[in-house]
Image: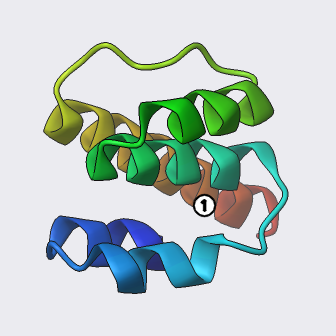
Amino acid sequence: MQALWYAKQGDWERAHVPIQNEADADSAWVHAHLHRQEGDLSNARYWYKRSGRSPAHIDLDREWEEITKSLLTKVANDGLLNQ
């Protein structure tokens, strides 16, 4: 979530730092989005593949919203399951 926050603020470098060493599929999806935002589509395709998702063909803001909603839903559901 931190990476997405920095990305939305337009700080690509700070967005990229917390996601670099993460290996799960959700982090790979965020990583793909960041490289797509950067314009490095080859690297973005690599990270989409690692995430198990097809490369996005939607507006960057819309993809950011989809990723954020997905991650927040997972956090909320995990919280409910742990009560």
Residue 3 position in % (x across, y down): 44, 73
From this view, report whether residue 54 is shown above or below residue 80. Answer: above
In-image side of 63 versus 50 (left or right): left
In-image side of 57 versus 52 (left or right): left
Q: Quadrant of residue 40?
A: top left
Crowd tier of the residue under label 1, counting other residues whose Cα lies within 10 Å: few below 14, some 14–19, many 20 or above: few
- Judging depth in this view, the residue of 26 and 71 nearest the camera is 26
* Total tally of numbered discs in the picture: 1
Q: Residue at x 31, y 52 (%)?
A: 38
In-image side of 32 versus 37 (left or right): right
Residue 60 position in % (x across, y down): 21, 36
Q: Quadrant of the C terminus?
A: bottom right
Q: How is the image coloured?
A: rainbow
Q: Which residue is mark 1?
A: 75
Name the secondary structure under disc 1: helix
Q: Residue at x 45, y 79 (%)?
A: 2
From this view, report whether residue 6 is shown above or below residue 74. Answer: below
Residue 20 position in % (x across, y down): 67, 72
Q: Amino acid at mark 1?
A: Val
Residue 52 position in % (x across, y down): 75, 23
Q: Residue at x 30, y 42 (%)?
A: 39
Q: Residue at x 68, y 33 (%)?
A: 46
In-image side of 30 versus 59 (left or right): right
